[in-house]
Amino acid sequence: MVQGSEIFFSDEFQSPAVKAQLEIFLIFADSVRAQLAPLSEATEREGAPEWHEILDILAAHLAQQLPNVTRIDQATSIWNQFSNDLKLSSLKTYTRVALHGIETRIGTWVAAMHAQKQHSTQYLKWANHSGFRSAEHLAAHQIRLLRVFTLKPLWVRFDPKGEENHASAYRSAGVVHWAFQVQKHSFWGVLVADKVLEHEYFCHMLPINSFLSSEIREGFLDRVLELEHASAALVETTEGYVESRWSFVLQRFRNELSRHFSESASFLQWQFRNLAQALRILNRHCYWRLLREILNAEDDLDLARAIESALRALCDYQVQGRLQDVVGRWAASPDSYKLLDNIGL
């Protein structure tokens, strides 16, 4: 776990009960992350229930029981209620061994926290640092941005009913926000808190232009992150196997979050997502050049509108089957050529 990133908590966490609820939530998240690979391998070997079905049962138990928590040692009671769930009565040997590994790690965490040797909030510090590093690596090595990009403090707030954004960030404020929400979707989210915060850094902190629309941020830029993770998941290595599981968890979190808020992406957002994928397939170099222009665009409202208009025009060309012609012209141009200023055929 990383010690270097700052983390702050809203006043609600001065309550011993709320603090204990958060700590148990993070203990479970850390313990499941450590055993996800063995658990998924076991269920693939032994059949139903699948690993994600087991985690769904655990998420439901946490959402139901956490509001009643007043002490850290109640983590054991929550685990026992989960493990005695009738839906898990048919578990076979290897799956039970993997779940025992999670239970053992939970017990180790609780003992260490009682001895004040560890604090589960280190999990959030790790997630913030990891999310930042992933966004920074993509910006520096793929997009080749040269400006300084720094780790931001993490502000943790208590939102038990899940009424606000799960996470948010604004470049002008210089702080990343994460909400502790006692809801079923939240456990899926905390399992991939690093990827959730990577999105905040890449889509909200990295772009200079604060006027970029949500369609650009949540559509085009977010799809860039998805495509990079998907590419890593296709590599036939242990790392690729694990990455594919985290990509599944992230998508499951987003699906659960959409159901929680009864919201879905706008049509334009989906168009921008499809556009990002098409550009990446057509010409990787032009794809990164376009990203560099969007992320480096000056902080100006008219310029933000012009960027959205340009992306809309590219979507129109995609529908017309002429996007390849635009990209072909881009590919023949020098790197000094501004792609966003030269959309037309």
Image (tube, rainbow, N blue to C red):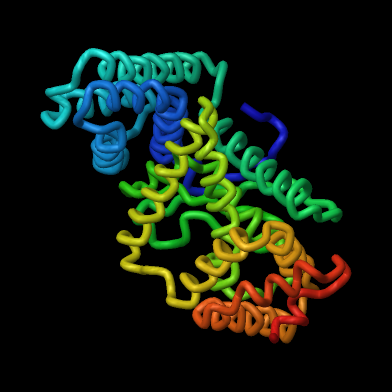
- Residue 135 vs 264, above or below: the answer is above
Residue occupying image coordinates x 51% and y 43%: 193
Residue 61 rendering spot, x and y as whole percentages = 25, 37
Using residue 39 as the reference point, say whether residue 209 is left or right of it. Answer: right
- Residue 237 vs 221, above or below: the answer is above
Residue occupying image coordinates x 84% and y 73%: 337
Q: Is 336 or 11 nearer to us in this picture? A: 336
Q: Is 330 or 161 nearer to us in this picture? A: 330
Specify the quadrant that holds the C terminus. Answer: bottom right
Q: Is 61 or 96 nearer to us in this picture? A: 96
- Residue 71 vs 63, above or below: the answer is above
Residue 344 rendering spot, x and y as whole percentages = 70, 86
Residue occupying image coordinates x 28% and y 26%: 43
Residue 189 rendering spot, x and y as whole percentages = 43, 46
Residue occupying image coordinates x 43% and y 76%: 267
Q: Is residue 172 visible from the viewing direction of this image? A: no
Q: Is residue 29 visible from the viewing direction of this image? A: yes
- Residue 266 vs 119, above or below: the answer is below
Using residue 190 as the reference point, say whether residue 64 is left or right of it. Answer: left
Residue 257 rendering spot, x and y as whole percentages = 37, 57
Using residue 259 as the reference point, say whether residue 194 is left or right of it. Answer: right
Q: How many marks?
A: 0
